[in-house]
Image (cartoon, grey):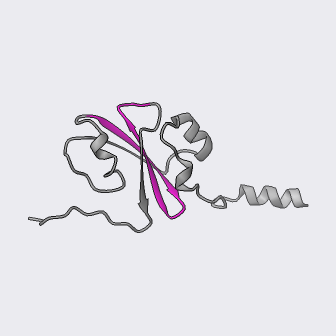
Amino acid sequence: MTRLLTGLLLALPGCTTPPAAAEFQVGMSRQEIVERFGEPDRRQSIVKQDEAIWGAIEDFWPEVPTESNVLIWAFEVEGGSTELYFVDDSPTVDGIGFAPEGAVFEATGSVP
């Protein structure tokens, strides 16, 4: 009976707790990430054109060469969202960003 209940609980969607942000590390391979955490909740690709950017990536952005393509994998984690950055088709994580739950990133200055 215990095995049946355990199996049912494991089979229910949404019963798993999200990973902690600290579980993601620079240098992890894409394959390792998918094996440990599953597919990302969101994928995005951007090319660095401007010097400034706002969001979880802003601390890593100065390290990205201009005209580089950055693939972003986002994972919902405890307390927010972790972004993993792969620069120019890198097979491993080059940088990591974190956005606390409910964070709003805005540009400073006036809006025309």
Answer with left or right where residue 18 lies relative to residue 42. Answer: right
| Quarter placement of the C terminus | bottom left
- Please state the horizontal and vertical placement of residue 12, each as a whole percent of the image: 70, 59
- Please state the horizontal and vertical placement of residue 55, each as a whole percent of the image: 32, 56
Q: Is 85 within the magenta?
A: yes
Image position of 67 with respect to 16: above or below: above
Which residue appears farthest toward the bottom when viewing the image? Answer: 102
Image position of 62 with respect to 8: above or below: above
Answer with left or right where residue 71 lies relative to residue 20. Answer: left
Which residue appears farthest toward the left when viewing the image? Answer: 112
Image position of 60 with respect to 91: above or below: below
- Please state the horizontal and vertical placement of residue 15, each as a whole percent of the image: 67, 61
Q: Which residues are magenta?
A: 68-90
Residue at x 50%, y 64% (from the top left corner): 79
Numbered circles on residues, count: 0
Residue at x 56%, y 34% (from the top left corner): 31
Q: Is 19 within the magenta?
A: no
Answer with left or right where residue 3 lies relative to residue 30. Answer: right
By secondary structure, the bulk of the magenta-drawn segment is best described as: strand
Q: Quadrant of residue 44?
A: top left
Residue at x 85%, y 58% (from the top left corner): 4
Q: Quadrant of residue 19?
A: bottom right
| Quarter placement of the N terminus | bottom right
- Please state the horizontal and vertical placement of residue 71, each as a whole percent of the image: 38, 40
